[in-house]
Image (tube, rainbow, N blue to C red):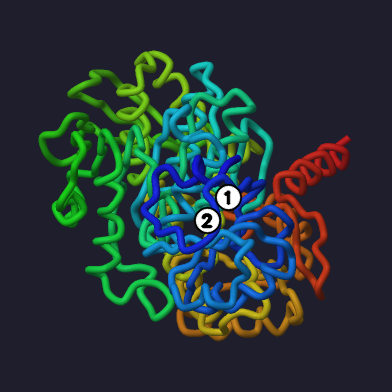
Amino acid sequence: MKLSKICEEIEYTLLQGSLETEVRDIIYDSRKIAPETMFVCMVGAVTDGHKYIPDAIDKGASVIVLEREEEAAQIPENITVLKVASARLALALMSAALFDHPARKLVTIGLTGTKGKTTTTYMIKKVLEMAGKKVGLIGTIGAMIGEEHLPSKNTTPESYELHRMFAAMVEAGCEYVVMEVSSQGLKLDRTAGILFDYGIFTNLSPDHIGPAEHASFEEYMECKSLLFRQCRIGIVNADDEHVDGILKGHTCEVKTFSAEKEADLMASDIGFINEDGKLGMHFKVSGCMDCQAKVHIPGRFSVYNSMVTMLVCHLAGISDEAILEGLSKVQVKGRVEMLPVSKDYTLIIDYAHNEVSTRSVLTTLMEYHPKRLICVYGGGGNRSKLRRYDMGEVTGEMADLCVLTCDNPRDEEIRDINNDIKVGLARSNGKYIEIDDRKEAIAYCMKNAKPGDMIVLLGKGHEDYQEIKGVKYHFDEREAVAEILDEMKAGKR
């Protein structure tokens, strides 16, 4: 593609060379530079792309995009040089052009907030798919094109990767893309130039505040609010105390959802479902939809996630019947995910692996008044001991029994990790046993479960491996549970 075409939507100064230069690809990682590529000198917290200009020249880059004009003095005249105010912003707009603006060919749904983004993106994806739509997804646990899984380093990938994924989705026949839009993604212009069809705000609480992320809660909120200056319709949680700050300076049409006040979609008559080992919520909605709804994901937060899903799908033209049918069947892998093992007890998989998320999950489950709440978990190796102490303390406080086992010990010994967890358990006088092999630990709980028990497997969630001494071994808790069930049935014959 000609450079002039790639640069149509950016502001720049041509320092030398020609806009007729052909560009095969855009590169921002100097290790990937090849002949006839454009190198964009990104300035980050750790490194400065300007340092790699000589490397780009040696590897045959035909165009260099920089922020500092003085750096052009070292560049041969046969190489085209553009100066821009922000390399990050330029990368986003040029990447969109390189891939022929794929986001404009999709219905784009972006979610921001502190909690619930991953679960809600999956809920929206599943409901749309059950209504016959092909949907792409981008978020914390990677990207999906239909059922094809693509790994991703960031919740919101770098802009070039984002547009490459969008293009692959268009090529695969996707009509929609649902994605998590992180505060960092907004702050660093990863989504710049995308006008989302729907921008969604779930909730806000202090998070990601520190030297490498956000300087303050106010900055964190300001970055989140940027989504509502780059979407057509904003869908926001009217019950969150920070909703006015999120909508400050918004340029979109606003739709609201609430369980407490007047809104475009309102939930009432909220109740808990506990049927044959399956947990969930039922509730009534009024406003733009008027019906009874249920979702088989436990917890009051599921009502809010469901309202987001219902409202965006309703606005996108999906029938109420299809929305309710999809909602009643949706499950999110590794997020309070129930496995149908018995009508007598409930077995749940959840990704919670720190004190905050664990307390949240256990608080949710306790609302269903289990006979006993049993936690199976370990701790990540090469990670903070404080996290282990906190996990031990909260599970000891809230669970009737903790079964300490293997998670991802990495370079540490399982027993050393679990000894740290026991420090926290001692603080809350928690009852525990130790079974190092995770499958054996799960089997112990299943074989000794009593009617009304809830067994929650914490820490692995969507993961399908265990990392031990530098090696990743396949381990999927769903497969392990299925094997245990088969072994238990065989033992009864």
Cα distance between the residues tagged 2 and 1: 5 Å
Q: Residue at x 47, y 23 (%)?
A: 326
From the top left corner, tell me how far across and down residue 430 is, in percent: 52, 75
Task: Name which quarter of the figure residue 287 lies in.
Answer: top left
Nearest the camera: 406 or 116?
116
From the top left corner, tell me how far across and down residue 35 is, in percent: 73, 56
Image marks 2 and 1: residues in contact by CB distance under 8 Å:
yes
- Give amino acid for label 2: Glu
Q: Is residue 372 visible?
A: no
Q: Secondary structure at mark 1?
A: helix
Q: Residue at x 77, y 54 (%)?
A: 475
Check disc 2 and report the residue beneath it: 158
- State whether residue 288 is above or below residue 489: above
Q: Residue at x 37, y 56 (%)?
A: 186
Count every numbered label the image shows and give the total. 2
Q: Is residue 406 visible?
A: yes
Q: Residue at x 39, y 69 (%)?
A: 208
Q: Is 237 situated left or right of 51 in this image? A: left
- State whether residue 245 is above or below residue 145: below
Q: Is 408 situated left or right of 199 in this image? A: right
- State whether residue 235 is above or below residue 30: above
Check disc 1 and report the residue beneath it: 161
From the top left corner, tell me how far across and down residue 461 is, in percent: 61, 53
- Give amino acid for label 1: Glu
Determine crowd level at label 1: few under 14, some 14-19, many 20+ residues with C-alpha closer than 10 A: some
